[in-house]
Image: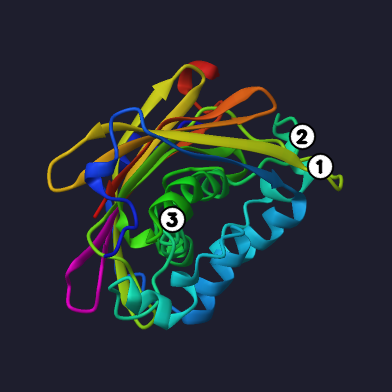
Amino acid sequence: MPLNRDFIGRSYEGGGTFEVGREHIRRFAQAIGDSNPIYVDPDAARAAGHKDVIAPPTFLTAVGMSLASSGPISDPGLGLNYALVVHGEQKFVHHRPVSPGDVLSSKTTIESIRDAGANELMLMRQDITDADGELVCEAFNMVVSRGTAASAG
Amino acid sequence: MAASVKYDDVEVGTQLPAQTFQVKRSNLVMYAGASGDFNIIHWNERTAKAVGLPDVIAHGMFTMAEAGRVVTDWVGDPGAVVEYGVRFSAPVPVPDDDTGTTLEVSGHVEEKLADNKVAVALEAKALGATVLTKARAIVQLA
């Protein structure tokens, strides 16, 4: 079943907040096998000019996952079958690093949906802001919906 | 930010130290928990094969994170990575064994930009396939 193209341009926000946790950053760094002390040692982070430890460059994927229940992937009207989804492209544009205590909000917009052979490509843009409303990161996420193009029958 | 690499010390073509990573099922389990991405294709072989994949595959974001370590290990301060993007060009199948799949990542300075920033291009291969294309990081150097 093709994705519902009426959803192009639709935005999702108000799904709650994501508070960045010190142990979450530590666990994420462990999971990617990265022993950089700036993720776990406040003194090392301060020596590098940060106020506290910071999160790895791809950590904010966890914000998308945490708030996904209010986003497009969980919207039944869009018609996305998550088992058919693979990740196509990802980009983070960081405006500042995130640290423990940051309370983040997210607004996700479906920028485009198009066919690529038998697959469909959906590009989402996620604006992640802090408690002051300042932009922390722009995350661009393109997912591939395998075999759902109308032409694939 | 305190990058340990100076802008004046690098040129277009400067190589970053290459690294290899062993990707095992246990890594995917840890990554699922840490990232919150519990997509069944990253841990259930039966379902992965039923939807046409060769095996359980690594989270694209896990591969992206590992490749990013070549940049952050080089520059020292992960906060110096101001932009990072990739295209996932092939899946990284991860077998149910003790060895896992070898991910090889290399990188070089592709362009020197204004304000002491550089663009780094990354290459990532697994099982003979290029698994990331358009892999590029913008890094703030000292």
Q: Is residue B37 left or right of residue B77?
A: right
Q: Residue furthest front?
A: B9
Q: Quadrant of residue A4?
A: top left
Under tag 2, what secondary structure? helix
Q: Is residue A10 left or right of residue B104?
A: left
Q: Position of residue A61 (x, y in %)?
A: 44, 57
Under tag 1, what secondary structure? helix
Identify which residue is drawn at 22% across, 60% down. Answer: A95
Q: Residue furthest left?
A: B114
Judge by depth and name the residue closer to the eye, B56 or A59: A59
Q: Residues at badges 1 and 2 in contact (C-beta under 8 Å)?
A: yes
Query: Amino acid under label 3?
Result: Thr
> Which quadrant would the C terminus of chain B be assigned to in this image?
bottom left
Query: How far is the residue under mark 3 from the one under mark 2?
Result: 28 Å
> Which quadrant would the N terminus of chain B be assigned to in this image?
bottom left
Q: Is the residue marked by circle 1 packed among few (<14), some (14-19), or many (20+) residues within 10 Å?
A: few
The chain that hosts pointer 3 is A
Query: Amino acid under label 1?
Result: Arg
Query: How far is the residue under mark 1 from the one under mark 2?
Result: 5 Å
Which residues are the magenta region?
A: A127-138
Identify which residue is drawn at 70% across, 59% down. Answer: B29
Residue A105 image label = none
Q: Which residue is mark 2?
A: B49
Q: From where the camera sits, is residue A76 visible?
A: no
Q: Which residue is mark 3?
A: A58
Q: Which residue is mark 1?
A: B46
